[in-house]
Amino acid sequence: MPEPVKPVPSYARWGEVPDHLRTTTQLAALDLPRQPAGPVRATIEAPNPGTGRKDTFDLYDVRESVPTAATAAQLLAAGARRTTNTRTCEDCGARPETPCTPAADGRALCGTCAHITRLRTRQAEARAAAQDVAETAYRLLADEHLAVLQIDYTPGEPTVAGTPRLPAAARFTALDRTGTSLYDRTVRLTGPRTPGAPDHAIDPAPALADLTNLLAERTVVLWTPGDLDPLYDALRRRGLDTALLPEGRVNSLRPAATQWRADLDPRTGELRRPVPPGTADRLLLLLRKMSADALRLDPEHTPDEDDDQEHGLLGEVPHRVRRRAAGMTLENIQQALHQARVDERAADRYADVGDETAHATAADALTEWQRVHDHITETGAERYDPDHDTALQHALRAERHRQDVAQCAREAAHQARQTTDTAHCRLGGTAAQPLYTTLDRAGLHALTDDDHQAVRDLTSHPRPRHAVPGHELAGAHLYRCPRTARHRPGPAHQAGRTPQPFLTGRHGLERLPAGSRA
């Protein structure tokens, strides 16, 4: 009877394939090409480079392969006709048997250097994501209604056969953002006759009702929502309500901590999953560390509402580029610059159909990436640091100085206008005060010298309002602000305003149409 054929191993990733197993194409692409001579030793399911669809490839043992029919002279002639370098790594100088991989910047890299490049790119992306996650942690800590929740289960005693039972009890610990205890109780999840629950465990119904009321108006942070699954199963078995946490206000810290740590598996390039903190105070400490890392605060410090906006002075798009570039190497920045050029060309096509905003944003990003690239090239720095970017710091100081000068000029003009208005009010005397009061209540604050002269002319010979002929106001160029401006504007609102004339009518102050005469 023939022996049954053993199934060959199957792989799902190229990283899992041993080095001695190659496809037919890989064997033919060797510097000294070979062809299979033995049976299929394994298979791999991977995307087909030609079609992009997932396909199954046969793998052969290199030790069972034989040379192709090509002679040494033919191989030498083929190498002489080759116009591109595919056999020498342009980074480390290695001469691998397999063709080098073209990188994003056009360089030919061996498998090791290409893997390192991919890891560096992935690290840069992870650092940028970690910054965003840390800012989210900062906002959570700034919420005075924050509640950090930890759930610890007491396992039930196993059966006689050794089968583990469901949890017998659960301890709930909740802390506010300062570490003060909000809730700390242990509830029984099984019946009173089931062994395993601590003696101090209480009935779950009233205890969980109190916890639900406590968390109703709070922002809850826990490690993962899966921590509640054993609790929900136990509550459903006992016929109790499982609506414990406020809907839409629950934050899972495990994916955020994974992004913040940015710890890559060097073999796969994937983020490693962190170990759970285990207690509520450690969960809060982790949240503080995440916030402190982004904002460069002390881990024991609870952040306030103040946020640093310095780098936003020169534009939001360049600010985002600099934040992403922080900590990048020259190689990472070159790749980002290449991608920015691609994005700018793509946005230019959309600009042709009327979307100018996307093209302007892409152009600003490309300009800033180019500036960052030129800076790190000139200085020879290993990584980009905005704090050591002399051109950036000079531009920030110049922009702050310009804003300070403009603010001082506005304040000086406002002070001079107030001084002039006070002198005119005194010159008008007590008879002019009612009209000035009326103008002030109507929101008319920016009066010119002609306006003050008109007020004095109107109040020097007082007559009933309806008896004042309109032609007497023809030369009085009084101006008013828009009717919506009911507050006294600061100096910034008084600059560049287009005045509009008004006249005194039977019902008070009426607007003159533009270009008309009284």
Image (cartoon, helix red, strand yellow):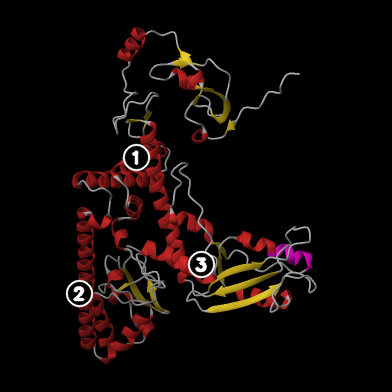
Q: Which residue is mark 2?
A: 412
Helix, strand or loop for disc 2: helix
Amino acid on which disc 1 is placed: Gln
Q: Label 1 vs label 2: CA separation?
A: 50 Å
Query: Between residues 26 and 494, which one lies in front from this camera angle?
Result: 26
Front of the two marks 3 and 2: 3
Rendered location of residue 222, percent (x, y): 56, 65
> Magenta stretch?
231-239
Q: Reply above or below: 207 against 425.
A: above
Q: Residue at x 46, y 46 (%)?
A: 265
Q: Reply above or below: 280 against 325.
A: below
Rendered location of residue 289, percent (x, y): 42, 65
Amino acid on which disc 2 is placed: Ala
Q: Main secondary structure of the magenta part?
A: helix
Helix, strand or loop for disc 3: helix
Q: Residue at x 38, y 23 (%)?
A: 97
Q: Which residue is mark 3?
A: 283
Residue 216 visible (yes or no): no
Front of the two marks 3 and 1: 3
Q: Quadrant of residue 249?
A: bottom right
Q: Reply above or below: 324 against 187.
A: above
Amino acid on which disc 3 is placed: Leu
Q: Which residue is mark 1?
A: 335
